[in-house]
Image (tube, helix red, strand yellow):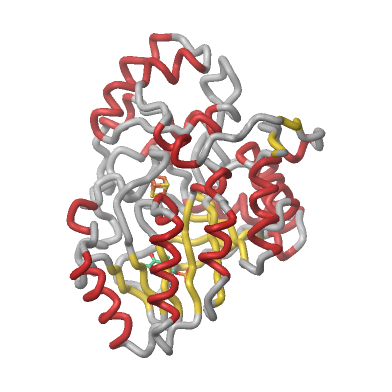
Amino acid sequence: MITRSDQPVQQDRLSVFQFEEEPSWQQVLRQAVTCPRELLSLLELPCELAEGARAGARLFPLRVPRPYIARIEKGNRQDPLLLQVLPVQDEQTETPGFVPDPLGEQASNSQRGIVHKYHGRLLLLPGQACAINCRFCFRRHFPYEDNTLDSAQWAAALDYIRQDSSVREVILSGGDPLVQNDRRLAWIVTQLAAIGHVERVRVHSRLPVTVPQRVTPALVSALTDSRLQAVLVVHCNHPRELCQRVCDAMRELVEAGVTVLNQSTLLRGVNDDAAVLVELSEALFRCRILPYYLHLLDRVSGTAHFEVDETRARQLLGTMSSRCSGFLVPRLAREEQGAPCKSVLPPLYPDPD
Ligand SMILES: *Cc1c(COP(=O)(O)O)cnc(C)c1O
Ligand code: SF4
């Protein structure tokens, strides 16, 4: 018997019990909606939005898995989940300062499949695909084609890690690394565990939240069967993304010993509101996830309409800090090209007068 509900957890509703088999995550990925018209029709939205959606989708295709669509409110064109996935005309707007590769990742890509910018940890990119295309994505212009690894390139990437004994943590990133199948992931973790100086594997993925079916017993084993400590950073931006089914998946991971953290991106119209951010932290913790980063948007072309300015961001953090437990306050961070780590911004508190 499988527990499933698309209700947000903060509403404290009973789970819906379903007796039929849930589709596999691979099926869910194959059945993702890629046609703007279909998305609009499923969500009972006016077809006048189709033109902008097609224009945006020409730059970066639309892709939304159906379990995520189920959490979007029908008929609401301002729905905070919808805004993250529906392509819009604004993506065509050129804005000064917004460029294809603001983080200079193409330059730090010295070894295929590896991005090594910070001391002690590096990104390993096993493949290009994502299960959901987020409109604000900082990788929308990243040349993934050059980063799909064949077996010789895998050997070279692993050699790179083996030869640098300062690397304690390997971060699987992407694309979405959990698009790889469980056998592949188990193989990667085994290879990393064979490198003596590697202590941790960290996975950055949006799949456990967007498609909780992805958290299979084989995935949990792949992450926990080696000597490495496992960390999963989910990317959740709004409390409504955390339905009961997601919460159940998180429990599996946490009970198996995975440390689960969250990283959000601060997005205008989606979560640039102190009450929403507080509720996000509270809902995350109910699902046993700890807030880690709240990221300012990377200034990628086509995403300017999502930007929240730095002062407003710091005020939101100030309000959050005065309303919730300290461990529920994420670090407000921005990634800067050439810096030795992400820059963390301090909160701004409202004037006492
Ligand atoms: C964000 C990031 C990391 C991880 O940084 P933490 O502060 O440890 O979370 C590592 N490498 C790159 C290139 C990154 O962008
Ligand atoms: S899942 Fe992550 S990498 Fe993929 S499109 Fe969304 S934000 Fe970008």
Query: Residue 131 appears in which quarter of the rendering?
Result: top left
* Quarter the N terminus occupies: top right
Furthest toward the top, the residue is: 47
276 to 144, vertically: above or below: above
185 to 341, vertically: above or below: above
Query: Left of 170 or right of it: where is 217?
Result: right
Q: Residue at x 44, y 41 (%)?
A: 26
Query: Residue 321 appears in which quarter of the rendering?
Result: bottom right
Query: Left of 114 or right of it: where is 272?
Result: right
Q: Please provide percent x and percent y for residue 40.
A: 45, 16
Looking at this view, is 90 or 183 the one in front? 183
Q: Which residue is drawn at 28% across and 69% down?
A: 114
Q: Residue at x 40, y 68 (%)?
A: 187
Count of numbered labels shown in the rendering: 0
Q: Please provide percent x and percent y for residue 197.
A: 43, 88
Q: Please provide percent x and percent y for residue 285.
A: 72, 55
